[in-house]
Image: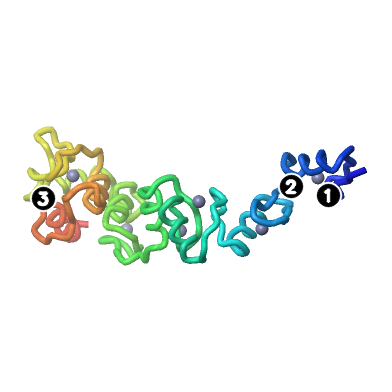
Amino acid sequence: MAYCYRCERPFRTLLALNQHTYDSSKHHMCPECTGDFKTLYELREHLVDEHDGCPECYDIFDSESDLQDHLFEEHNMCSICNQFFKSPSNLKYHQLVHREKTVKCFACYRMFVTKSAMVLHLEEGTCKPGIDVDVIDDLATDCYESHKYLDNDGDYKCPTCAKYFRFMSGLLQHAESDSCDETLRWKHGPLAVFLRFLKTRV
Ligand SMILES: [Zn+2]
Ligand SMILES: [Zn+2]
Ligand SMILES: [Zn+2]
Ligand SMILES: [Zn+2]
Ligand SMILES: [Zn+2]
Ligand SMILES: [Zn+2]
């Protein structure tokens, strides 16, 4: 009689035992060798370490670097923390967490990864008392370039693609992204002008 020691369970035939190891959640079989792992996690580690195999689709590669390319291109893996993401844009957004905080708040000591994150901090009222979304909206209106990023109703609108935003931080994030040609890098751009104006007022 065949017996599974891990599950402490007898099987009538070797075939039945085999079938069990493939079906049971307590067995995770390596498709490349006879390895049988207790957890999916162990199997995934084994695939990567022993076979240069992809832990997501179980494809086997010739070298570690081929595997890395595959993980990055097919599974949007972050090469810094090895997490997987649904889409390239999700990965890109995630990788912000690995970026150094180089933007100092205009009004306090806190540091941020992007200018939009810093302005969001101002809008949310997590900076100095007295600075909140109303103050940012008022300053956005006061800036002499405001006609380029506010429409007649005072709503935020991208100067380049005319997309609407509820908050200044949203518009700034849009300008920081690659989804539009609007940018904060050009010194005379209306949003860069606003940021300099903001700096002198908070
Ligand atoms: Zn078993
Ligand atoms: Zn194996
Ligand atoms: Zn894969
Ligand atoms: Zn990461
Ligand atoms: Zn602050
Ligand atoms: Zn735009």
Give, as a three-letter code, the residue at label 1: Arg
The nearer-to-camera label among 1 and 3 is: 1
The quadrant the C terminus occupies is bottom left
Q: Position of residue 88 (x, y in %)?
A: 37, 50
Circle 1/circle 2 CB separation < 8 Å: yes
Extreme-top residue of the structure: 153
- Element type at mark 3: loop
Is the distance from the Cβ of mark 1 to the nearest ligand 1 atom less than 8 Å? yes
Q: CA distance from mark 1 to mark 2?
A: 9 Å
Vertical placement of residue 48 versus 147, above or below: below
For the point 31% across and 66% down, the residue is 102
Other-residue count near label 1 (Cα within 10 Å), few / some / many at <14 / 14–19 / ≥20 = few
* Labelled pair 2, 3 in contact (Cβ < 8 Å): no
> How far apart in space, not on screen, are marks 2 and 3 (Cα)?
65 Å
**Disc 2 target residue:** 27
Q: Amino acid at mark 2?
A: His
Q: Which residue is tagged 3?
A: 143
